[in-house]
Amino acid sequence: MEDNKKTEDIAVQLSTDGELDEKSEAVLKKHDKESATRKLAGAVKKIFFIACVLVSCYHLYTAAFGPPVTLVHRSLHVSMMLALCFIMYPFSKKSDHTKPSIVDWVLVLLSFAAPAYIYTDYLGVVERAGNANQTDMIMATLLVALVLEASRRVSGNALSILSLVFIGYGLYGRSMPGMFMHRGYDWTSLSNHFFANTEGIYGTSVSVAASYIFLFILFGCVMQKSGMGQFFNDIALALAGHTKGGPAKVSVIASGFLGSINGSAVANVVTTGAFTIPLMKKTGYSKEFAGAVESAASVGGQLLPPIMGAAAFIMAEMLSVKYSSIIVWAAVPALLYYLGIIIQVQLRASKDGLVGLPKDQLPKTGEVLKRQGHLLLPVFFLLYMLFFSGTTVIYSAVLTILVTIVVSWFKKETRMTPSDLIDALADGARQTVSVAIACACVGIIIGVSSKTGFGLTMANTIISLGDTSILFTLVFTMITCMILGMGLPSIPAYIITASIAAPALAKLGIAPAAAHMFSFYYAMFANLTPPVALASFAAAGLSGGDPMKTGVASVKLAIAGFIVPFMFVYAPQLMLINTTLAEGTTVALTGCLGVFLIAVAVEGYFLAPVAMWLRAVATVGALMLIKPGLDTDIIGIVVMVVLYFLQRKKASAAAAT
């Protein structure tokens, strides 16, 4: 307890239940549309709370004992998320932010029309797929309208407008130019495709949301209630707080840990940034650099196993592989990304003469582990279940939630009460709404793509622009992913880019796993890349820095992440695909050296300031180390050795004067 008190003397302490102060909450609502919810009160608040608990209980029950027939289960999941959405999210900024309007309650009731219709006439709906009657069309139209409106409320206009553009493309395909022309479909056919099968709104993304995503969000809520967020902050402070540039390293470690569980870059920025950004500013980092560290580290949490946010579950479903395979593939690239940030933080601290926090004001590693270390047991249990138990991911998640509750009882400080558990159930449903609505809306886009062949057309276009060159195709794919990812939540951004860009890469012989991970990385990085950089702008709101400068600084810090995807495309051994331990280790080590040289080139500092020409040489050396092959590795290592001796000589000369 004494360690916690000392930590509070350094900066504003993050509360163990995840609540935010007023400034942090205002920043979150400004930059993250998904967080701009109503503050319910009175009877409505109680009704909503009970509804959320019941929704979580339904998903736990179906996970443990099996769901109803596919279309009924998915439609019921979407309807529950729609109903919660219309209660949580106001129609506009001018709407009442304390209680839903009459129109909202009508929308809540209409949300259950589709599953009720499907349940009462299931065989008829399925048999008429592709030949819908008028009632089918009315129900399909109602579903599409509700999903579009809910998406607008939750995520802003971007995803809804994009979905409407795709609907227009599906309706007026005969008027499209060149290779984008298709036969065109009437509204009855198109809307029924969204509604009556598993290729539209009730497609793969909703399937994953109704199972994996819901359960792992609930798992994260249970862990937060047990004090895991506090543990991440404390252990990061204990491990890195006293080192050179310690507060920035604390930000990187804490944000990485928390981000791998909660999966939301902007929410992660605000949650950990409220604690870490004041620490960084206090020790001498600029406002923009402090915000950039937090945003870069928070975005990377979605790339870091074991949970990686929600998009990784969709990747496993799209590739038809075990989720444990995604964990293996993502491990080394994610560590290289975070290594790049840590190295730049260290170099910036050395260049600016920044020091760490006083040891006597920090918690001690042994004390933190003794007090809260048992909270890591559920994570180890989850990894065991995923890799060695042979059980499904869904069942593993349910058991891990139960284990987390039991483990929390090991110590009085972390013991969850029945009230905590009920709150966690409610939080799980609340936090899933934004993800589930995005998954439902992106089903419209995927439905149009599958019906019109748009995905294949785009793949051929990307390949033709790249002129069959893998490098050019990768660059065009990167640009496409980042443009599509701007302003969209990370999950729909990944689904859209993977559906459009990954097939283009696969056509050139790139491993499907590498192609999807490539799309995944750049869809995530849209969160910190100007001009639309939601994570960076949120961090700037907390630090008081300039948003665009913070965005630029975030890109510099995340530079390794922009290069790593090219690394694992050219060297799949980096993802531990079809490789030996020796090959994987070699590629990982040379990748680490390449990331180090990139960091030196960006920061312009090693043991002493690095001249511009030498930074250019370091960049070349980094690219040589990134490209697989003995000859290129030798060139890169020679560059590193020469750089070291030149820097050592320069540092010695500076010290002698």
Image (cartoon, helix red, strand yellow):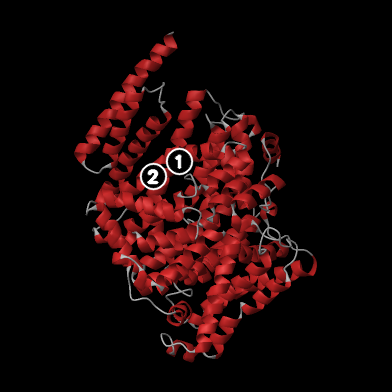
Residue that extends furthest to the left in the rendered view of this protein: 631
Which residue does the numbered mark 1 point to in the structure image?
555
Task: Give the left or right position of residue 514, taking residue 235 as reference.
Answer: left
Q: Earlier in the sequence, mark 1 or mark 2?
A: 1
Q: Which mark is residue 562?
A: 2
Task: Answer above or below: position of 513 versus 198.
Answer: above
Q: Dividing the image into 4 quarters, which one contains the C terminus?
A: top left
| Amino acid beneath label 1 | Val
* Image x and y of residue 253, in percent: 52, 43
Q: Residue at x 35, y 33 (%)?
A: 597
Task: Give the left or right position of residue 625, taking residue 76 as reference.
Answer: left
Judging from the image, what secondary structure is the residue with disc 2 in? helix
Judging from the image, what secondary structure is the residue with disc 1 in? helix
| Amino acid beneath label 2 | Phe
**Disc 1 + disc 2, Cβ < 8 Å:** yes
* Image x and y of residue 427, in percent: 65, 62
* Image x and y of residue 399, in percent: 54, 67
Q: Residue at x 42, y 52 (%)?
A: 483
Q: Residue at x 38, y 67 (%)?
A: 318
| Closer to us: 3 or 116 | 116
Q: How many marks?
A: 2
